[in-house]
Amino acid sequence: MKSNEILRIIAGILCFIVFILLILQIIFDFPGAVVFYNFFVDIQKSVNILEGILVGIFSAFNAILGVLISVIVYINFGIMLIAGRKVRFIAIGANIAAGISIILTIRTLIIYSLIMEFQILILILLILYITIFVICLLTYIKERRQTQDNKPI
């Protein structure tokens, strides 16, 4: 196996690990998932109790929907990275998904640091997102170099 194929398979396996951790996050750390996926809702701006309850319900629904979309995205990228079809486009898509996840995870860590709390699952997810981003970037660069080297003059 070439190093490019090994990197692709490792990135695909890491995508499956992210899928499992996202499911565990929604089961065991639901408030963390709510903080992670609700980047445009400020619960402190609610005026009365009914509005606060509605914002809470909306936030919970948004977190479940966000985890569902993330799970689908990472399962698909994991399968496609392991299968190895059109590696360049898959690597770009995985980089976009991992980049968005990195930004949201850093935001979540900042929010948790403001309330003096620490979530190990969020930190593990951040490390996995950064690793997937770097591996997919290396895979894209290597694949691009191979196609440029194989082009006739």
Image (cartoon, helix red, strand yellow):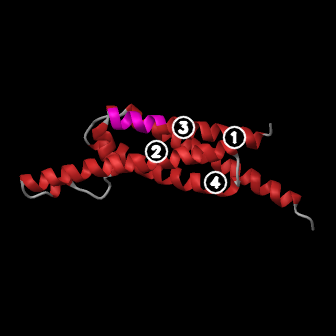
Q: Residue at x 52, y 43 (%)?
A: 129
Would you say the residues marked 2 and 1 are in contact, meaning their CB atoms lie under 8 Å apart? no
Measured in 3D between alpha carbons, the distance from the residue under mark 4 to the one under mark 3, in whole angstroms, is: 15 Å
Q: Earlier in the sequence, mark 2 or mark 4?
A: 2
Label 3: few (<14), some or many (≥20) within 10 Å?
some
Q: Which one is in front in this view, the residue at disc 2 or the one at disc 1?
A: 2
Would you say the residues marked 3 and 2 are in contact, meaning their CB atoms lie under 8 Å apart? no
Side of 84 relative to 119 (left or right): right
Side of 135 relative to 23 (left or right): right
**Circle on res. 7:** 1
Residue 127 in the image, given as x and y percentages of width and height: 51, 38
Residue 103 in the image, given as x and y percentages of width and height: 44, 52
Q: Earlier in the sequence, mark 3 or mark 1?
A: 1
Q: Give the amino acid at mark 2.
A: Val
The quarter in which the N terminus is drawn is top right
Side of 115 relative to 80 (left or right): left
Q: Residue at x 66, y 41 (%)?
A: 82
Outermost right residue: 153
Would you say the residues marked 2 and 4 are in contact, meaning their CB atoms lie under 8 Å apart? no
Q: Give the amino acid at mark 3.
A: Phe
Q: Earlier in the sequence, mark 2 or mark 1?
A: 1
Q: Which residue is mark 2?
A: 71
Secondary structure, mark 2, is helix
Secondary structure, mark 4, is helix
Secondary structure, mark 3, is helix
Q: Main secondary structure of the magenta part?
A: helix
**Circle on res. 16:** 3
Measured in 3D between alpha carbons, the distance from the residue under mark 4 to the one under mark 1, in whole angstroms, is: 13 Å
The quarter in which the C terminus is drawn is bottom right
Q: Which residue is mark 4?
A: 90
Q: Give the amino acid at mark 4.
A: Ile
